[in-house]
Image (tube, rainbow, N blue to C red):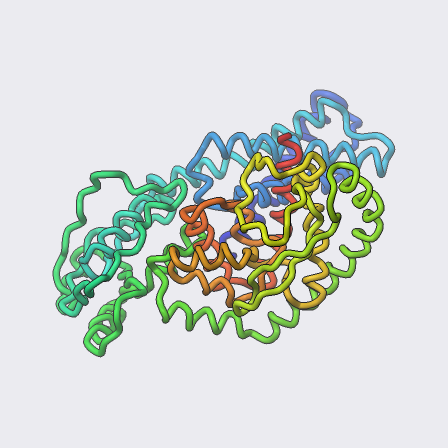
């Protein structure tokens, strides 16, 4: 969050300078008497500033992972510049009945795009080519090797794994033990095939004497590593030498904003309990749920006659339907939705909805794009069965299938399900076990890190994703 705040503050300062620079050019070369900029039409200029900062934040330009893709950064920066110019045009006409001139709008949009993109390209080069932080991974088994190789592909972390430490107490695989799924599932950060194993620098017991010579600053311990007195003593000796001790899950969640399943264990769950049990956060979250649910249901009441008519004319069957879903603590509840598919018998087998699903009606496709079909779920929010933000609830039959194939799937039920969520804004709908495993890694990140600020962030990003999806069609 501190990095995101820094991005926002820097964007605000640079965009303000860009607007003033554009205004200076306009007054010098185009129209000397032009009242434009933060000292002129302040409201218009401020609207451009606000649109630029919000646009950069909502389109993901605050995410270091996105900065490595320079072409995407440039395209999004151009979009931010266009959005800012449109914002100034609309506000100018609304307040002054006349927006800035075309030359002023174009110059300002270009200046804002350069301000937003320029420093990010410099920062991305620093992330890729700047000084690295030497780290070691405790343990030299397959899981440690896999994690170390995967971490090496996340160049935006500036972490460089120099080697591994042999741990004499590392457990041997148990009979029937299944190795977890590889971390190479991480989008944008695949582990290249044929990556050479990293060297073993020595044993954990001699690490306190060995690592300073390698300039190591961090030691990373996999969360699944058993805790023993000898390990704690060895890690304490490293800490006393100024080497930071951290866990693999913390590093990966900070770097990728999700939690791969092979980094989950009982200790992570205990930490999640502390995050979940914060009474003040729960009460504020519930208050926000109630305020938005009541307001949203008022909107639904106004739309209901038109919805009822459109759905009934499009296909036979009920307009509103209830479907069993698995929610908080694994309890089943009835989720309400506007019907967007052809009517099916109540005993029809559960199936994943896929893009272009033939069961979706013409009106249903529009309602799904606008997410209007989910407005009745505000009843579930009002009743306390759901929250505005949380993991999306699944049908009982699908939950049973995923529980058989995906470890720790039940952990997503530690919080209330939501209308939108962290997984939805990063991945969207899933229609397979493999995609559901990746989706779960985002859900677990939310379970372990959720807060009221994060909920507000997700809601804002959901609105942006919806608007982008509508605009792309």
Image coordinates for residue 263, horizontal then vertical, percent:
34, 60
Task: Say left or right for 312 vs 392.
Answer: right
Q: Name the one closer to the observer, 329 or 61.
A: 329
Q: Name the one closer to the observer, 134 or 36.
A: 134
Task: Say left or right for 318 vs 197.
Answer: right
Q: Quadrant of residue 251?
A: bottom left
Image coordinates for residue 202, horizontal then vertical, percent:
12, 60
Residue depicted at x 53% and y 59%: 396
Q: Name the one closer to the observer, 275 or 80.
A: 275
Task: Say left or right for 137 vs 116.
Answer: left
Image coordinates for residue 444, horizontal then vertical, percent:
46, 59
Residue depicted at x 23% and y 68%: 238
Q: Is residue 1 visible?
A: yes
Residue depicted at x 58% and y 30%: 78
Note whether 428 is above or below 69 in the view shown. below
Q: Quadrant of the C terminus?
A: top right
């Amino acid at each position: 969050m501190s990095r995101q705040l820094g991005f926002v503050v820097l964007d605000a300062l640079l965009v303000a300078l860009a607007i003033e620079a554009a205004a200076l050019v306009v007054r010098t070369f185009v129209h000397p008497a032009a009242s434009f900029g933060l000292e002129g039409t302040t409201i218009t200029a401020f609207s451009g500033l606000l649109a630029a900062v919000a646009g950069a934040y909502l389109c993901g330009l605050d995410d270091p992972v996105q900065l490595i893709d320079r072409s995407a950064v440039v395209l999004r920066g151009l979009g931010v510049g266009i959005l800012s110019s449109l914002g100034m045009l609309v506000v100018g006409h609304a307040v002054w009945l006349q927006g800035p001139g075309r030359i002023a709008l174009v110059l300002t949009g270009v200046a804002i795009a350069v301000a937003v993109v320029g420093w990010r390209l410099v920062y991305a080069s620093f992330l890729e080519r700047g000084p690295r932080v030497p780290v070691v991974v405790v343990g030299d088994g397959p899981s440690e090797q896999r994690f170390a190789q995967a971490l090496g592909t996340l160049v935006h972390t500036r972490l460089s794994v120099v080697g591994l430490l042999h741990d004499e107490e590392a457990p041997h695989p148990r009979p029937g033990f299944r190795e977890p799924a590889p971390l190479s599932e991480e989008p944008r950060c695949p582990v290249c095939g044929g990556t050479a194993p990293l060297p073993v620098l020595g044993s954990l017991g001699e690490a306190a004497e060995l690592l300073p010579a390698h300039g190591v600053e961090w030691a990373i311990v996999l969360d699944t590593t058993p805790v023993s007195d000898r390990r704690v003593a060895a890690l304490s000796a490293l800490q006393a030498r100024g080497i930071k001790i951290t866990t693999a899950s913390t590093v990966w969640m900070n770097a990728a904003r999700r939690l791969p399943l092979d980094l989950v264990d009982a200790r992570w769950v205990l930490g999640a309990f502390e995050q979940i049990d914060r009474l003040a956060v729960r009460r504020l979250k519930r208050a926000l749920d109630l305020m938005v649910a009541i307001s949203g249901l008022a909107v639904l009441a106004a739309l209901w006659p038109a919805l009822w008519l459109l759905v009934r004319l499009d296909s036979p069957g009920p307009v509103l339907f209830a479907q069993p879903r698995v929610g908080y603590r694994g309890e089943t509840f009835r989720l309400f939705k506007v019907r967007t598919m052809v009517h099916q018998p109540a005993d029809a087998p559960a199936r994943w909805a896929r893009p272009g699903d033939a069961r979706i009606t013409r009106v249903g496709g529009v309602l799904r794009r606008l997410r209007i079909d989910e407005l009745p779920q505000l009843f579930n929010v009002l009743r306390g069965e759901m929250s505005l933000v949380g993991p999306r609830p699944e049908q009982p039959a699908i939950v049973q299938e995923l529980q058989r194939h995906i470890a720790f799937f039940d952990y997503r039920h530690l919080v209330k399900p939501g209308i939108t969520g962290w997984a939805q804004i990063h991945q969207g709908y899933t229609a397979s076990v493999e995609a559901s495993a990746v989706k779960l890694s985002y859900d677990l990140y939310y379970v372990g890190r959720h807060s009221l600020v994060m909920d507000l962030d997700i809601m804002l990003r959901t609105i942006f994703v919806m608007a982008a999806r509508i605009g792309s069609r």
